[in-house]
Amino acid sequence: MNPMISDTMPMQPAEQHGRPSTLFRICRKMWHLKMGVMGGIILAVMLVFAVAAPLIAPHDPYEQNIIQRLLPPSFMENGSDRHLLGTDGVGRDTLSRIIYGTRVSLIVGLSAVCIQVGIGVILGLMAGYFGGRTDSVISFMVNVMMGFPFILFAISLVAVIGPSLQNIIFALGVTGWPVFTRVTRVETIKLKESEFVLCAITLAFSTKRILLVHILPNLLPAILVLGTVEVARAIIRESLLSFLGLGIQPPTPSWGMMLAEGRDYMLGEWWLAAFPGFAIFLSALGINLLGDALRDLVDPHMRKD
Amino acid sequence: MSRSLPDHILEVRDLKKYFPIKAGVMKKTTGHVKAVDDISFFLRAGETLGLVGESGCGKSTVGRCLMKLYDITGGSILFRGRDITAFNRRELIDFRKKIQMIFQDPYASLNPRMRIRNIIGEAIRVHGLAERGEWQDRVAALLHDVGLRTSHMARYPHEFSGGQRQRIGIARALAMNPTLIVADEPVSALDVSIQAQIINLLDRLKEKFDLSYLVIAHDLAVVEHISDRVVVMYLGHIMETATDRDLYTRPAHPYTRALLSAIPGTGKKNRQNRRIILKGDVPSPINPPSGCVFHTRCPDMFPACRQEKPPMVKISENHWVSCLKYTG
């Protein structure tokens, strides 16, 4: 074979597959955007449910009606039009309880993440900026927390301080911060060497000012993205604790607890567990989608195409 | 060379800055990058001193040591006769008001999330450098001084070009009312057409605010225009110090001659026409060559250069050179 041809031959496929086509990138972008909007809608609906639960819920979530217990959803045989998603073992309306359950999920999710951000960001800023021994100690704490099984830690904590809404938030807050520390620490180390931070040092600003005014605002997008995802995780963990009976105490409706109650009827009345389970799944999915879309918006590499 | 004279605003004596190289799990120090090794120079009040050398020669490290961004390994830095390494908190703040820095990269040196008003005005407010309520007027005046408009105050850095950003950086440094400005490659990131504007601006501001400059650059042509004296660095050492005119018309050190010959022809009469091409790369500062650090690439090298460290020799007023050709 002619040596010139053999030289050029392998070049051609490389050129064709070098980069994804513009069309592909636009489609991907649109898809991400659409998913993000969907996530936003889900979160908005949850917020409306939580705030206006008494106006939206068709029934009182605490009202028991033994005669109408264990009704199937209205789309099934024997279902009642009055109870769209059926009733539970003591005749309470499932749909109303799910709507009220949004409150617990959102309050726990948002509050727990606020605590996580508070602890995690402060420690991350300190570890990243001061380095040295401070960094070693904080990084060690992060590794211990991440290596320790969350559920064991949260269970023992709640067992000691007792199950209640505040204690759940506290338990989730003090166990979930290490991810924020990690992200903040790495970003702070990067920013510490940047010229505008060096400049702030030469302008004789205090360390507190440099951390809070110069570094922290540049971390907010990353923290916002991570925070969104962590809200979803906190909601799932609250359900888990409530499912185990260590979370919200009856009769306050919580998705995790409804799931636990539904477990007794799993074989016959599957919907009792399925609907709260679906609510957990949908809310976590929606918040994650929103977080993903936010990440795309914030990440300058994604923003370019 | 290191007599402390009253008009010396800055004096650097035997400055050393070594960066440790750490390796392994135990973070053991296995060696040092000798970024700056035993350099001495001084700066008179009202003077502009150029510090030139190839990238990696330690010139930026010198600048950062002067700003106390790095702790020095050895030697001393005297600012108005006082050792800056011995400053306490209070003194350090006062020192930092007097010495300011202009950074190389106008894109990285401005906080992207702050408006210009705050970038320039923050120091004024924090340190109380203007009457309460008048800080914005001060910012406006500074913007005017560096050739920007008052209407730019409410904008963010990304709305400006490189040259404009560098002007903002200059205004920020001036806000502290400094007496000395360290300019670390102030124009190397800018287009050639903009470079001249910024150099001229620095020149003008020097008159107006009674400043002294230490201009760090890798480009002799940039330094030539602005400097009164020039220090040539190579691999953490000073090769030659001379007045602007001496250096460009009568370069003594072979390294300086090579650098000068690399400036594209501007038709200067006394400049050599023959281009000196240095062979090889800059040696590693971890293991600098013995004797004269330049001997591995020197066109005029003779055997003694391998062993003997050349001392600084005065060859005329204000002209010092570190080369064995001029000793004894």
Image (spheres, helix red, strand yellow):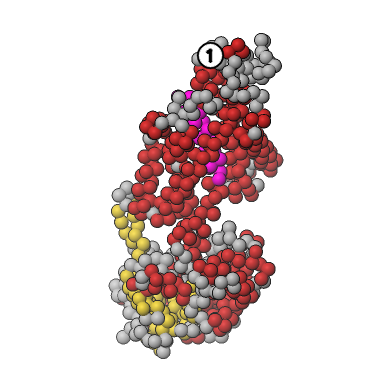
Residue B119: horizontal and vertical position, in percent? 57, 65
Q: Is residue B272 left or right of residue B306?
A: right
Quarter of the image holding residue B204? Answer: bottom right
- Tell me the quarter of the image containing the N terminus of chain A: top right
- Residue located farthest toward the bottom when viewing the structure as drawn: B317
Q: Is residue A68 left or right of residue B255?
A: right
Residue B95: horizontal and vertical position, in percent? 42, 74
Quarter of the image holding residue A129? Answer: bottom left
Q: Main secondary structure of the magenta part?
A: helix
Foreground pick, A116 / A135: A116
In the rendered image, the vertical position of residue A156 relative to residue B177, given as above or below: above
The residue drawn where x is 51% and y is 72% is B128
In the rendered image, the vertical position of residue B317 relative to residue B169, given as above or below: below
Foreground pick, B187 / B82: B82
Q: Which residue is mark 1?
A: A265
The residue drawn where x is 38% and y is 63% is B284
Instruction: Tell me the element at label 1.
Output: loop
In the rendered image, the vertical position of residue A232 relative to residue B258, given as above or below: above
Magenta region, residue range: A224-244
Q: Is residue B81 left or right of residue A249?
A: left
The residue drawn where x is 47% and y is 29% is A247
Res B252 seen here: no
Residue A43 included in the magenta stretch of the image: no
The residue drawn where x is 52% and y is 62% is A196
Question: Which amino acid type is shown beneath numbered disc 1?
Answer: Tyr
Mark 1 — on which chain does it sit? A
Q: Callout 1: 10 Å neighbours few (<14), some, many (20+)?
A: some
